[in-house]
Amino acid sequence: MGWLFYFQSMKNILFLLSVLVCFACGKTELKEPVIYEGPLREIENMDLFYSENSSVKVKMKAALVYEFSNGDQEFPKGIYLEFYDAFGQLESTLSANHAFYFKTDKQWRGRGDVVVKNLLKQEQLNTEELFWKPEQEKIFTDKFVTIRQQGDVIYGEGMEAKQDLADFEIKRVTGDFEVKDDEI
């Protein structure tokens, strides 16, 4: 009888364990799927040319480009742009330590050491952040800017200009610059 009692006890214990395992298995948590939001494509050492009517308008160089599913692009190692006039002459350059292209806004943002040079007028703009709208050929910022012209240095906060820096407006101007009598 001792052996039969032991066998019945083992049978009951096994039954209880199987019931507990079934209850434990029934309470699995459903986890949300992880959605990848990183870059879909990576490009190294990119050289891009934009042309109209068989003449180059813009040259772009970037060491690294990330392309995202929504069409945005990130340039984590910086960007360098050259702008050409209708005759193919280099007018101006733009460089930044980091850049981002927002496809929905059709707008670029440069950050870090942003430098725009108008080679014809020998002028240079320096700022820490600059936006560029290619369709409007316009650059702008709300950050501190320094513009060096021949003999003058102009400081200010906030600026709008043509992309070649040919015409600009600084919102809050400071600095020393020369005003000629015939300009008054």
Image: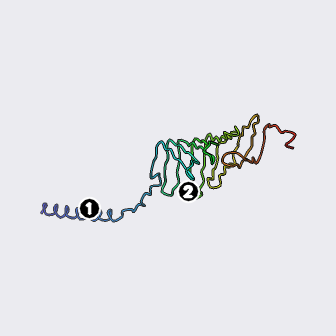
Q: Can you say which quadrant of the picture contains the N terminus?
A: bottom left
* Residue 31 image position (x, y, % from top left): 41, 60
In the drawing, does residue 108 fall left or right of residue 27?
right
Color scheme of the displayed model: rainbow
Q: Amino acid at mark 1?
A: Leu
In 3D space, how far apart are the residues under numbered discs 1 and 2 (Cα atoms)? Answer: 59 Å
In the drawing, does residue 154 fall left or right of residue 58?
right
Which residue is pictured at 23% across the width and 65% down the height? 15
The one nearer the camera, 25 or 19, is 25
**Residue, disc 1:** 17
* Residue 179 image position (x, y, % from top left): 83, 39
Q: Can you say which quadrant of the picture contains the C terminus?
A: top right
The one nearer the camera, 89 or 81, is 89
Asked if residue 18 is positioned above or below residue 107 in the image, the reply reads below
Which picture quadrant has residue 151? top right
Mark 2: few, some, or many residues within 10 Å (few <14, many ≥20)? few
Q: Amino acid at mark 2?
A: Lys
**Residue, disc 2:** 103
